[in-house]
């Protein structure tokens, strides 16, 4: 399930399904919105959402990673999570333990 928004740098970035999209996904730095194409395999959708969230982080922090940098980080994170899903979930649970919203 795709969340309706993600919080980055104090901003809520909406995540919307867009059947008119001609790519897997897109982050628009002008509107600060993420759009995702519907109907993809759930693993592809999750990877695409992660990819676009990384673009939003790149924009918010002015990292200038570009497409190549974002794709490299996405690929590394997805590979790590697929290699050890329980370990990745445990790491995230530990990171979020006691964390409130926001």
Image (cartoon, rainbow, N blue to C red):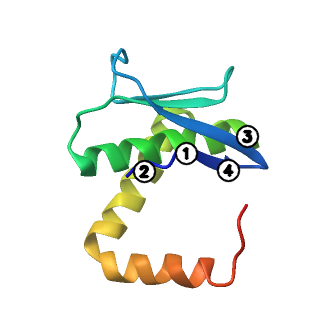
Q: Residues within 10 Å of mark 1 (few under 14, many from 20)?
A: many
**Residue at mark 1:** 54
Identify the residue at horizontal 27%, vertical 45% (top origin). Answer: 44
**Residue mark closest to the camera, 4 vs 2:** 4
Q: Quick one: label 3 or label 2, which is nearer the N terminus?
A: 3
Q: Residues within 10 Å of mark 3 (few under 14, many from 20)?
A: some
Numbered label tally: 4
Identify the residue at horizontal 67%, vertical 22% (top origin). Answer: 31
In this rendering, the answer to whether 78 lies above or below 27 is: below
In this rendering, the answer to whether 18 lies above or below 78 is: above
Label 4 – label 2 distance at C-alpha: 18 Å
Could you say which quadrant of the image residue 30 lies in?
Answer: top right
**Residue at mark 4:** 7
Circle 4/circle 2 CB separation < 8 Å: no
In the picture as drawn, the residue positioned furthest to the left comes out as: 41
Q: Quick one: label 3 or label 1, which is nearer the N terminus?
A: 1
Q: Residue 29 location in percent, x, y? A: 65, 25
**Residue mark closest to the camera, 3 vs 4:** 4
Query: Callout 3: helix, strand or loop?
Result: helix
Label 3 – label 2 distance at C-alpha: 17 Å
Circle 4/circle 1 CB separation < 8 Å: no
Query: Callout 4: helix, strand or loop?
Result: strand
Q: Which mark is residue 89?
A: none
- Front one among 3 and 89: 3
Q: Which mark is residue 74?
A: 2
The answer to whether residue 3 is left or right of residue 101 is left
Query: Callout 1: helix, strand or loop?
Result: helix
- Front one among 61 and 39: 39
**Residue mark closest to the camera, 4 vs 1:** 4
Q: Quick one: label 4 or label 2, which is nearer the N terminus?
A: 4
Q: Which mark is residue 60?
A: 3
Q: Residue 88 location in percent, x, y? A: 41, 76
């Amino acid at each position: 399930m795709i969340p309706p928004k993600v919080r980055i740098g104090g901003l809520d970035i909406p995540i919307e399904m867009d059947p008119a999209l001609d790519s897997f996904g897109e982050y628009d730095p002008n509107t600060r919105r993420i759009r995702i194409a519907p109907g993809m395999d759930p693993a592809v959708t999750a990877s695409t959402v992660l990819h676009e969230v990384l673009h939003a982080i790149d924009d918010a922090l002015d990292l200038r990673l570009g497409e190549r940098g974002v794709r490299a980080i996405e690929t590394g994170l997805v590979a790590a999570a697929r290699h050890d899903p329980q370990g990745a979930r445990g790491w995230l649970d530990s990171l979020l333990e006691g964390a409130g919203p926001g």
